[in-house]
Image (cartoon, rainbow, N blue to C red):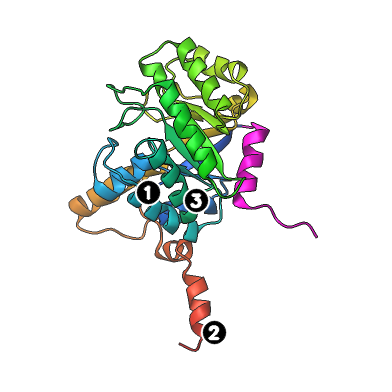
Amino acid sequence: MTAPLSPKQRLRALAQARRGVIVPGAFNALSARVIADLGFKAIYVTGAGVTNMYFGLPDQAFMGLADIADHTARIRDAVDVPLLVDADTGFGNALNTYQTVRTLERAGADCIQIEDQVSPKRCGHFSGKEVITADEMVGKIKAAVDARRDPDFLVMARTDARSTHSFEATIERAQRYAEAGADILFVEALENQDEVRQLPRLVDKPQLMNLVIGGKTPIFNATELGTLGFGFVLYANAALQGAVAGMQKALTVLRDAKEVQEDPALVTPFLERQRLVGKPFWDALEKKYGQ
């Protein structure tokens, strides 16, 4: 009997299929459970989301390796869906990147994303970004590839060069990163539809397109991006923005009406919340062990 594929192998197969698989971002274990429960095939552990929700701060390098490793481990315990993990700049030079891969793979990551921004980095859709040299980034990618223990562990290389370089120079970087061993490429913050459409034709490697609601890149339907040849379509913080909108709506009602009823249009019902956090499983264990 054929053994089931590991999450890393499933993720690699999805990347190679290039069908525009939607990857929502999770900022904690419960958001990951919601994503998995809705049938999505992969989850992105978002650095911006962790920074926003854990610290209440903007995505400007306030998160460290220990923070994202802790969240990755908790999310890994909650779901068996493949995890792509945001490792920012690798948290330092090539040696730091090597250790970052070791740490995050041990925590349960199936893929890590490293980017070529100057540290301290900032959200890819903020102004004022700068990038390191392509040579330095190539060294980080090679370190990441060498550090992985499981050969199916994936390395995703992100370039933020389009904010400061020409489209052609950005493509040259992406090609160099592919040659250095990156399994997936992530060209951040393209600003027009033509560049998005050209990208898969110019670099023959599985690619991820990041669509930030309110960001610089025009929104495309994921089906169209799959047709163009993108492997993944990332919505890193759709869940976060939806959660914040939901909190604001429910709390506004509480503030103004002085009460909140169990209205599914306003709040998740009590029993649904318990289902999502696995209470039936723990109830069964409690019965099994005679507690």
* Sequence-wise first label, 2 or 3: 3
Q: 10 Å neighbourhood of mark 2: few (<14), some, or many (≥20)? A: few
Residue 17, quarter of picture: top right
- Is disc 3 in contact with disc 1, using a CB cutoff of under 8 Å? no
Residue 291, quarter of picture: bottom left
Residue under pointer 2: 288
* Residue 218, position as x, y percentages in the image: 44, 21
Q: Is residue 33 visible?
A: no
Q: 10 Å neighbourhood of mark 3: few (<14), some, or many (≥20)? A: many
Magenta residues, as a range? 1-19
* Residue 58, position as x, y percentages in the image: 26, 37
Q: Nearer the viewer, mark 2 or mark 1?
A: 1
Residue 288, quarter of picture: bottom right
Residue 136 vertical position relative to residue 11 in the rendered view, above or below: above
* Residue 4, position as x, y percentages in the image: 70, 56
Say what amino acid the circle numbered 2 marks: Lys
Say what amino acid the circle numbered 3 marks: Glu
Residue under pointer 1: 68
Residue under pointer 3: 105
Q: Considering depth in this image, is 276 or 248 the residue closer to the camera?
A: 276
Q: Considering depth in this image, is 235 or 251 the residue closer to the camera?
A: 235
Q: Can residue 12 be found in the magenta stretch?
A: yes
In the figure, is residue 6 to the left or right of 33?
right
SS of the residue at dot 3? helix
Q: CA distance from mark 2 to mark 3?
A: 34 Å
* Sequence-wise first label, 3 or 1: 1
Query: Which residue is drawn at the image coordinates 41% and 43% (left, top)?
Result: 239
